[in-house]
Image (cartoon, grey):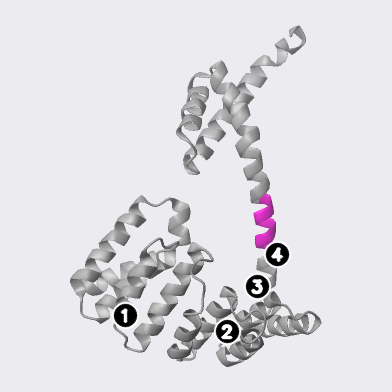
Amino acid sequence: MDALQPYLPFLLNLLRLLAIIGLIHAVVTRQQVYWIVMLLFGALFGGLFGLAFAAVYTFMVLIPAARGSSRAAGQAVARGVEALKPLDTRIREAQEQLQESDTLQNRADLAALQARAGRPDDAQATLAPLLSGIYADDPVVLLTSAELDLARHNPADAETKLNRVDLRTSAATRTRTLTLLAQAQDAQGKPEADQTYRDATTGATTEEPRARHAAYLIRQGRAADARALLDALAKTEQKASGLYRRQEREWFQMAAGLRKELK
């Protein structure tokens, strides 16, 4: 203990600094209240328990979070480098990859690139073999193909495929399927689109169904119903975390544009 005596002021200051850093991180990332309280105590008063919590928080939360961020950053850089390639080059490489290994993922990747290039017919042709093979009922295949049908102005074909998706697969699959189904029904002038949008909103994993439902209601001349939905979206945006607002930015922006239409 005597040997550590000269280093104690440095160690205490280090732990207090970690408490401050941890406190900022805990507040920003919305950690449990007890973390915030103990880190605040350590940052302000340097108490033994507060500083001990700073050390624990560093090893249990900060360091793992930093490692995860490093991996995410590396993946982001890789995606960025890939995105710099011309789209035609990426399509050609995806076609070569598909020739080497004809898998669900490789076909889906190629179809996605072709769709981005404004070639929905080519993308649908790429997916076509999967629709009659062992992956015929795979939600990824059906959803991707249905989206392409909508892009090609074939809502009836999209509806047929969407009705084959197993909604029990996951909440995200259910949300996406019902949202697309409502769009397909709307494009055909079917009145059941309203209820389908409502079903998509129940337990939704994204704000897309509510935003699209509001747009649908405006087109139907139901301004009061649309306004109520948009007001609820605005309240959600105000209460949402920064991460969720970024994740759902497209739909919050769509809702903001729709509110302007109603003024």
Q: Are marks 4 and 2 in contact (CB under 8 Å)?
A: no
SS at badge 3: helix
For the point 67% across and 15% down, the residue is: 8
Q: Main secondary structure of the magenta part?
A: helix
Disc 4 marks a residue whose amino acid type is: Ala
SS at badge 4: helix
Instruction: Tell me the CA gap for discs 4 and 1.
Output: 44 Å
What residue is disc 3 on?
A: 83
Left or right of 169 on screen, residue 194: left
Q: Are marks 1 and 2 in contact (CB under 8 Å)?
A: no
| Lower position in the chain sequence, tag 1 or tag 2 | 2
For the point 37% across and 87% down, the residue is: 187
Instruction: Tell me the CA gap for discs 1 and 2.
Output: 28 Å
What residue is disc 4 on?
A: 78
The image position of residue 79, as x and y in percent, is 66, 67
What residue is disc 1 on?
A: 192
User: Against 31, is 168 above or below?
Assistant: below
Task: Classify the position of the C terminus by image quarter.
Answer: bottom left
| Lower position in the chain sequence, tag 4 or tag 3 | 4
| Lower position in the chain sequence, tag 4 or tag 1 | 4
SS at badge 2: helix
The image position of residue 162, as x and y in percent, is 48, 80
